[in-house]
Amino acid sequence: MRHFIRSIVLLLVFSCGAAIAQTATTVSEPAKTGGFKVLLEVNSADPTTWNNAVSNATQIMQVVGMDKAQVEVVAWGAGIKMLAKGSPVAEHVQSLSSYGVSFVACGNTMKALHMSPKDLIAGVTVVPGAIGEIVKRNHEGWTQIKM
């Protein structure tokens, strides 16, 4: 009887070990499949909100690693103003762009505000609509964070 109980205990220990190993593989999976993809959504012209977005993008790149992270900041509504040349965060946007963070402006908002791509900080991409970009990125498995 003692031998039987010992066998059961060993079986449980090995089963738990296999489950833990499988969990560890699952946790590291994003790095194998192209890394972490994070979409920061900003619809505010408040410099504090934008400084938070810039800070979060920086932290993601530092913690996860630039080679394992894709970060995109999508601006729409009042948030477009912070992607304009001369905005209070223009230097931060340019700096992060050089490290691979993408900044995307909503074309619909730009039309409503009578803005053109030449009004934006160099490197900012214009998409037809922010909502379409957000839906597309969600479908592709990106993690969305509303700022």
Image (cartoon, rainbow, N blue to C red):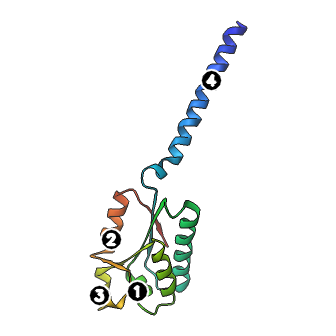
Tag 1, which secondary structure? loop
Q: Is 31 situated above or below 54?
A: above
Badge 1 local density, few (<14 within 10 Å), some, or many (20+)?
some
Labels in figure, total = 4
Q: Is 14 situated above or below 38?
A: above
Of pointers 2 and 1, the one earlier in the residue sequence: 1
Q: Which residue is mark 3?
A: 112
The type of residue carrying mark 4 is Leu
For the residues bearing labels 2 and 1, Cβ distance under 8 angstroms = no
What's the residue at 55%, 40% (across, down)? 23
Q: Which residue is mark 4?
A: 12
Query: Going by the picture, which residue comes out furthest to the right?
Result: 2
The type of residue carrying mark 3 is Ala
Q: Where residue 69 sits: x, y (%)?
A: 48, 62
What's the residue at 57%, 36% (across, down)? 21
Of pointers 4 and 1, the one earlier in the residue sequence: 4
Q: Which residue is mark 1?
A: 121
Residue 74 occupies quadrant:
bottom left
Tag 3, which secondary structure? helix
Q: Which mark is residue 131?
A: 2
